[in-house]
Amino acid sequence: MGNKKQKNDTHKLQAKFKNEVLQFHNDGGALFIWGDNAPLYDHANLILPVIMKDKDVVLMGNTPGSKVLKVGSGDTKQQFGRHMITSGIVNMYEGVTICYPKTLGGLKVLATSSDGHPAICYADHEVLDANCGRVVVDTGFTKNYCSWDEAGTARYIINATVWLLGLERRLIQGEAITSRVSRSKSSKSK
């Protein structure tokens, strides 16, 4: 009896988590989604298929990492591409043991792991609904506490966070940069 109740409670918590995150995202909130080796991506897999409108956009796997990626082409093994997120970075630690997306859907690859899988991906208003926030998916959250001071990690986190804010979009729309992005009139009537 206890296991059945525990599973039911877990499903309720997962549903609440998913609904709250999706509401935040649909209201213009940006998402920095982190994963790592199995099973440390289950939370991401509740969200990714819904926001990317593709049931196969999920994280999976458990590949060795612990290497440093170099600036180059984002879709080349052990490299990351040039983007506002990687501005000023020449090396980036990939994480210890990492996962990867099963499929990309509309995600764009920014970095490829030393094992040849997408390691950092992003999506913006080219593929997301107009009022949704931007998305960054990073498959090696261990970079946040292993080698934090090495290989560009701190700068990457700062750059990604600023990019996620979408300040240039707010300025173009005439929005105050201190408030949440408002929904357009056409989206409110839907």
Image (cartoon, grey):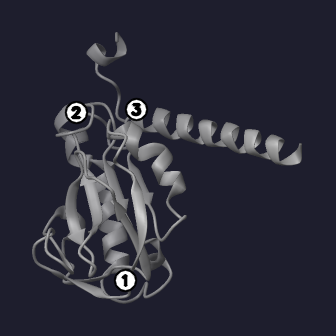
User: Does the image show residue 29?
Assistant: no
**Residue drawn at the location 26% of the way across and 37% of the way down:** 128
For the residues marked 3 and 1, what is the alpha-carbon distance in whole angstroms?
33 Å
Which structural element holds mark 2? loop
Q: Which residue carries the number 2 mark? A: 174
The amino acid type found where label 3 is placed reads Asn
**Above-or-below relation of 135 to 15:** below
Place residue 102 in its image quadrant.
bottom left
The amino acid type found where label 2 is placed reads Gly
What x and y, as percent, mark residue 43? Answer: 53, 53
Which structural element holds mark 3? helix
* Quarter of the figure that contains the N terminus: top right
Question: Which of the two marks, 3 or 1, is nearer to us in this view?
Answer: 1
Sequence-wise, the earlier of marks 3 and 1 is 3
Is mark 3 in CB contact (under 8 Å) with mark 1? no
Residue sitting farthest toward the left: 73
- Quick one: label 1, few (<14), some, or many (20+) residues within 10 Å? some
Is mark 3 in CB contact (under 8 Å) with mark 2? no
Sequence-wise, the earlier of marks 3 and 2 is 3
Sequence-wise, the earlier of marks 1 and 2 is 1
Q: Which residue carries the number 3 mark? A: 26
**Residue drawn at the location 38% of the way across and 87% of the way down:** 66
Residue sitting farthest toward the top: 189
The amino acid type found where label 1 is placed reads Gly
What x and y, as percent, mark residue 39? Answer: 55, 64
What x and y, as percent, mark residue 53? Answer: 32, 35
Place residue 70 in its image quadrant.
bottom left
Q: Which residue carries the number 1 mark? A: 65
**Residue drawn at the location 10% of the way across and 72% of the way down:** 73
Place residue 18 in its image quadrant.
top right
